[in-house]
């Protein structure tokens, strides 16, 4: 990959999964040394060094459900256990356009942004999964926050991560390579990015890429290759960036999803990344930005 | 990839996602021409040509929840809409050792196996998600079976696919490359495969590979690369096969998960794939089998 590491990767925490399944070890972590991530709903605080703000377990409400995030190495040696409390409400439909979130991504130190992203995804999952999907009964946090158990039917539930493909489609035109980028319905004018979609049950990554591109653009692709992945915590996607080739550039745009789809030249993509092109490139925190950089540099 | 396509890929159905969101188009599909996948619980029938058995919508109970699987092209032109009915119960803990499932994988034609895998994952998801995880209220099938809506709080729920990493770890020993393979707790004697684990919120594929290998074997890996992916419908994993390198072969085995971990030579892996090695290789339907073939042939 060209450029800096992808946003939301590179958390410094040791997830110490052996602690989760060991009630005694877990109880031993929940002491005065433990750190509690300060959250206002799902939003973190920001300290003077652009890091996350931490409190102690004493700051959590008495009946709070606590998630064990992992161990944080301390300057001078040793580790501190890190927790986050499940907030009263999750965020069922986080808006990508939320300016507070984009401001946060720009402000937070990269390793703290990664730590926050993982913590946000999991406490949000808990907040939206207080009941059992199998029987409707109440569920209770278990395994240090990496599981919920139904108190009525004993079903076990696990945090969810949704795989999403996001893909470059390249067409070798007579005048040089072109890249397919699209503007989704409701996106700002000029904002173009790589097409993307959830992987469905019963398909590989490569099949999902081909299906999504065909559904949205009418273009058939071949030779799908994987480039990079990124966890995206709104609420909990695993973005998997791919590249593919098209032999035909004729578009049949799905107008229920896309406002526009265009084929751009290498020069146009490069200019857009430099902030001076025919479209507005996706922001640096999005994997689509890295995919465009990768394409320019390959 | 070396060898034949991965099992559970290559479904011939057109998912026709535009139909899902269009109640009129969907209703128009639910007629006498439509095919209904015959299921006994979650198990399919098998016809004389090793294909799936189909009935008509008249075979479904009056109150059945129907999932629109997609359009099946007919010999001689045209398509037929395909549906599956949600069974009374799902399968909360499908056992990999279930001999009926392995027999089915060997018997079914590859394209029908892929079609069945996708159908099984989604009807099983419906059967285990009749209630709203957010409020405990009853949910109702929507969008042709690609969504459930809560009748009480209006939350929307979507079919789940869990990303799982499965990885080769290679160590360049003085006498040639060695591959790390493990035997999980409770697995048959001699059965070794690639290590695997769920991707957690807040990590990339590459980070998940490194974490899982370290947790289970104590070995640090670098240079993780993606090889291939496979949908696995028990209940609904997306298996993502990767390769990585280790600079040290010293093992610290996590005895809560693994019975044994060994480093095998190329010759040993090749012999095992031929059915005559020091361990029993994973069966051809598993992506691990393909990963071992890939390693032998690379």
Image: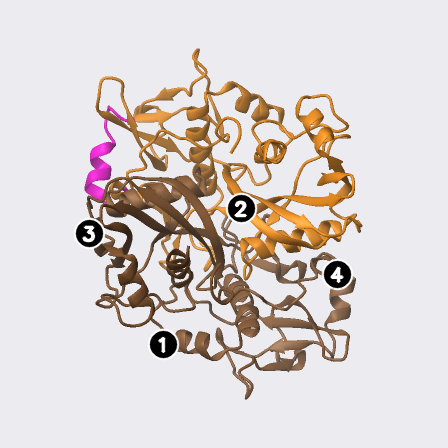
Chain colours: A orange, B brown
Tags 4 and 1 touching, CB below 8 Å: no
Q: Crowding near pointer 1: few (<14 within 10 Å), some, many (20+)? A: few
Label 2 marks a residue whose chain is A
For image coordinates 42% across by 21% down, the residue present is A52
Helix, strand or loop at mark 3: loop
List the residue tagged with mark 3: B255
Helix, strand or loop at mark 4: helix
Label 4 marks a residue whose chain is B
Q: Name the N-terminal-most of marks 3 and 1.
A: 1
Q: Crowding near pointer 3: few (<14 within 10 Å), some, many (20+)? A: few
Tags 3 and 2 touching, CB below 8 Å: no
Task: Give the mark toward the camera: 4 or 2.
Answer: 2
Helix, strand or loop at mark 2: strand
The answer to whether residue B275 is above or below residue B247 is: below
Task: Give the mark toward the camera: 3 or 2.
Answer: 2
Which mark is on residue A226? 2
Part of the protein shown in magenta: A20-34
List the residue tagged with mark 4: B23
Q: Is residue A161 or residue A249 the one in the foreground?
A: A249
């Amino acid at each position: 990959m060209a450029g800096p590491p992808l946003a939301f990767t590179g958390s410094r925490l040791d997830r110490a999964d052996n602690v989760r399944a060991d009630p005694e070890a877990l109880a031993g972590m929940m002491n005065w040394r433990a750190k509690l991530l300060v959250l206002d709903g799902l939003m973190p605080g920001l300290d003077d060094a652009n890091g996350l703000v931490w409190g102690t377990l004493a700051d959590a409400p008495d009946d709070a459900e606590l998630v064990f995030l992992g161990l944080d190495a301390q300057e001078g040696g040793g580790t501190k256990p890190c927790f986050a409390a499940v907030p009263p409400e999750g965020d069922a439909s986080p808006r990508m356009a939320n300016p507070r979130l984009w401001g946060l991504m720009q402000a937070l130190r990269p390793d703290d942004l990664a730590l926050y992203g993982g913590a946000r995804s999991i406490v949000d999952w808990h907040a939206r999964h207080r009941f059992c999907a199998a029987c409707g009964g109440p569920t209770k946090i278990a395994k240090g926050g990496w599981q919920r158990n139904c108190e009525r039917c004993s079903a076990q539930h696990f945090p969810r991560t949704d795989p999403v493909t996001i893909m470059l489609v390249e067409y070798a035109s007579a005048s040089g390579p072109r890249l397919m980028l699209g503007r989704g319905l409701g996106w700002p004018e000029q904002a173009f990015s790589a097409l993307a979609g959830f992987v469905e049950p019963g398909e590989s990554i490569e099949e999902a890429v081909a299906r999504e591109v065909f559904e949205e653009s009418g273009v058939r692709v071949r030779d799908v290759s994987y480039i990079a992945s990124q966890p995206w915590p709104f609420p909990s996607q695993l973005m998997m960036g791919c590249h593919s080739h098209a032999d035909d550039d004729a578009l049949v745009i799905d107008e229920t999803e896309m406002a526009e789809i265009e084929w751009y030249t290498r020069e146009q993509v490069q200019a857009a990344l430099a902030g001076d092109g025919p479209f507005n490139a996706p922001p640096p925190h999005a994997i689509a930005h890295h995919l465009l950089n990768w394409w320019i540099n390959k």
